[in-house]
Amino acid sequence: MRVLTLNAGSSSLKYKLFEHQGETTTELLRGLVENIGESQGVWHHTRVQTNTHTHTFANHGEALEALAAMLLKTENVTVEAVGHRVVHGGAEWYQPTPITEAVLNAIEALVPLAPLHNPANIAGIRFAMHAFPNAFQVAIFDTGFHHTLPPKAHQYAIDAQTAKRHRIRRYGFHGINHDYVTLKAAAFLGKPRETCQLISLHLGNGASACLVMDGESVDTSMGMTPLAGLIMGTRSGDIDPAIVLYLQRQGFTADAVDRLLNQQSGLMGVAGDNDLRRLLAREENGDESARLAIAMYIYSIQKTIGAYLSQTDALDGLIFTGGVGENAVSIRERVMRPLAHLGFALDEDLNAARATADCSRLSCSGIPILMVRGDEERFMTELVMQLYASR
């Protein structure tokens, strides 16, 4: 059975195609369409090698029609199921769900909570239903893993009736990957996840932490939106909420504040660049703003680790995942080195080794420190197959 996974962004479309046979899931191909709706769209498609083409796609529908035609004519494959990453499922939608018109309407009703993401997800779903009319279509919610947050973690200390009326609460994000890597980590440690206490650090351009107790997410750093929590590439992370009011009184519109905090803050705001590789190189050359940005970034991660440790009695492991978490050796070292007194002992050689395994240990003693490669699409495929088999 072949399963296509789709992640439709506001101007992009990421896809992977998997073949599932027995107990084996094999990736057949992957791709990324960028700059949808612009004059110079770019399509990267990888099977054996990456081919990059310039295309103009007016919308996600044209991109998906081109993808469907390519799969059928060039790759000679049919798609039997499609898994859609949906950013926001609110408090009600957390299980992988077969897509119906009622489900689409529910996702649409959540647009006010995710105005940048859910509209693109909806468009991607509708176009995919047209492009692959016979495929089993499934919505997988990125907020879903965090539906187990207890009230003390998900409720904000504002007027309870106002919060309820406007659906204001912590939802959390990166749930698909936190779910996946904590399952992998528990298996690597030889324990059922239901008995584990784990801290998962998803570090990329977006970044979040998650505390898992007895197999469930009980706290996470992102909040009602993906803007909260750790310092990120272009997002501020946690700031004093009154800063927003202050800026508006200074003449900033709501949209201007939104752009500032989501696109012009974080590492970008402090040092003018959201790429940690370039910032590390600048730091080596004595750039003070790069040094400060990296120090602030690491500090925000360390504070969160400390807060989560205070809620555990016997942490089973700490996980690094995401583009930065999986690859930035020096960032991992700088995060963990000052935390030795808390029971962490990062091994310099293991940390520096180029790990080829999907899961590897970075410590020889103390609390296990792990690197787990995220593969949201493969996990989505597994979830789609489970749902397909249970129909």
Image (cartoon, rainbow, N blue to C red):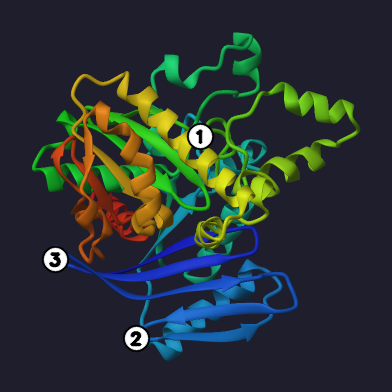
The first of marks 3 and 1 along the sequence is 3
Which corner quadrant holds the N terminus? bottom left
Relative to 336, 313 lies left or right: left
First in sequence: mark 3 or mark 2? 3
**For residue 361, side relative to residue 98 (left or right):** left
Label pair 3/1, CB-CB below 8 angstroms = no
Q: Amino acid at mark 3?
A: Gly
Q: CA distance from mark 2 to mark 1?
A: 37 Å
Please tell me whether mark 3 sits on a helix, a strand or a loop: loop
* Direction left: furthest residue: 190
Left or right: 108 as drawn, with respect to 324:
right
Instruction: Say if 372 sits above or below 299 in the image.
Output: below
Q: Which residue corresponds to mark 2?
A: 48
| Residue projecting furthest to the right | 251
Near-viewer residue (166 or 151): 151
Number of the label disc, if any, that sits on residue 22: 3
Query: Where, by quadrant of the figure, is residue 47 drawn?
Result: bottom left
Look at the numbered discs 2 and 1 and tell me whether their residues touch, using CB distance below 8 Å. Answer: no
Image coordinates for residue 182, horizontal then vertical, percent: 26, 42
Q: Quadrant of residue 191?
A: top left
Residue type of the residue flagged with mark 2: Val
Q: Secondary structure at mark 2?
A: loop
